[in-house]
Amino acid sequence: MHVLGAILDHETGSSSISSSIGSSINRSSSSTSGGGKDERQRDPSTSQAKDITASAPMTERDPPAHNGTLRPEEEMEALAVAEAAAEADASYVPTPSLLNNPDPAALLVQVDGPSIANYSTKESTYIAKRVPVPLRGRLDVPIHISAGGSVVSYEMSTENYDISFGVCAEREEGVTVVAETARVDSHKEAVTGKFLVGSVPCAIVFTFDNEYSWFREKFVTYTITVQPPSTENIVTGRRSRTKAALRAVKDDLASAEKRLEKAIDQRTTLAAEISRMEKELTEKKKSLDVAVKEEGWLKDRTMLRKQQTDLLNKRMTDGWADEKTEK
C-alpha cells in the first residue's frame, strides 16, 4: 500500500506528478560560488523528482483571477492531485490490525475519512525561523496527517552552511522514505518540495541532520504547509476506498472461508481419531486392570510355590521327624 500517492514538483518551473516515492525532494543545484559557505569538499550533487506526465511551463505565475476561476497552473495541479488521490484511494488496502479489530465499524472510520459536515479546506502552515541545530545533533519535525489526499509542501533554508535534509512517513505498517537524508546546499538556495499523502493516519517527519558537523551549529528556517483535500476529493475518495476495502474484505473472506473449511475438516478428522483412540484407551485400561490382577495373583502363586519347593527339598534332605523317633 502506498502511503504517498504522488509527488508534485514545482521547483523546476513545471507542474508534474511522479509515482516515485523516494525521489520527492528537489535539491537546488547551485554552483560552489556564491555568498554562502559549504562544509563539503566535493561538488554538490542534485536530486530531482522524475516527471511522468506532461508538464506546463510556469516561468511566471498568472495574476489572481477575479472571477473565481483557477489559473492554468492551478488547474493542472488540482487535476494532478485529484488523479493521484484517486489512484491512491483505488489502491487502498486496510491494515491487518484494522481488519482484525473486533469492532467491525472501526474500518469505516478510515474508509470514511473526515466528515464533510462543517468541513474546512483551510490549509495549516507550520513556520519556524532560525531554529538551531547543534553540532553533532539533529532536529526532527513531525507533522501528523489525518486526512488522506492532503498535499504537503515545504520550503527550507539554512544560514551560511549546508545541512543534511530528508523526509519520511511513519505509519502503522512501518516507515516509508519520501526522500533519503542527504546534504543539501540550502544555504545557497531554498529547498522546496510538494507531495500527496495517500493513506492515513501517518506522521510526516522532516529531518534536519547536523550529526556530521564537528564544529558548526546550523540555523534552519522552514515553512511546511498542509492543504487538506477538497470536499469533492473526499466524496470521491470515500467511494474509491469503500470499493477497494470491499474487495480486500471479500478476498480475505474468501480466503478465510477456505481456511475455515479446511480447519473444520481437520477438526472433524482429529476428533474422530481422538474418539477412536479414547475407545482403544478404554479397552487397554481394561486389559491393564486384568494384567495387574493377574500379575498380583501370579506373584502370590510364585511365592507360594517357592515356599513349597523349599519345604519339600528340606524333607528330602532332612527326612521326617517321626521316622527318626521310631529308630
Image (cartoon, rainbow, N blue to C red):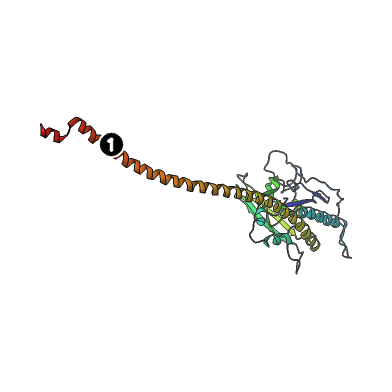
- Among all residues in the image, which is located at the extreme right? 67
* In the image: residue 324, left or right of residue 203: left
Tell me where residue 23 appears, x and y as whole percent: 75, 46
Q: Is residue 160 visible?
A: no
Q: Is residue 36 above or below residue 149?
A: above
Tell me where residue 274 appears, x and y as whole percent: 54, 48
Report the front residue among 253 and 152.
Answer: 253
Report the front residue among 310 and 125.
Answer: 310
Instruction: Count residues near mark 1 (Cα–Cα under 10 Å), then give few for <14, some for 14-19, many for 20+.
Output: few
Tell me where residue 262 appears, x and y as whole percent: 65, 48
Residue at left offset 33%, top offset 41%? 299
- Among all residues in the image, which is located at the extreme bottom? 118
* In the image: residue 138, left or right of residue 156: left
Which residue is disc 1 drawn over? 306
* In the image: residue 87, left or right of residue 146: right
Tell me where residue 205 appears, x and y as whole percent: 67, 53
Quadrant of the rendering where the C terminus is positioned: top left
Q: How many numbered discs?
A: 1
Q: Label 1: state its secondary structure.
A: helix
Q: Is residue 290 visible?
A: yes
Report the front residue among 154 and 85.
Answer: 85
Q: Is residue 313 above or below residue 87?
A: above
- Among all residues in the image, which is located at the extreme front? 326
Q: At label 1, which amino acid type do we have? A: Lys
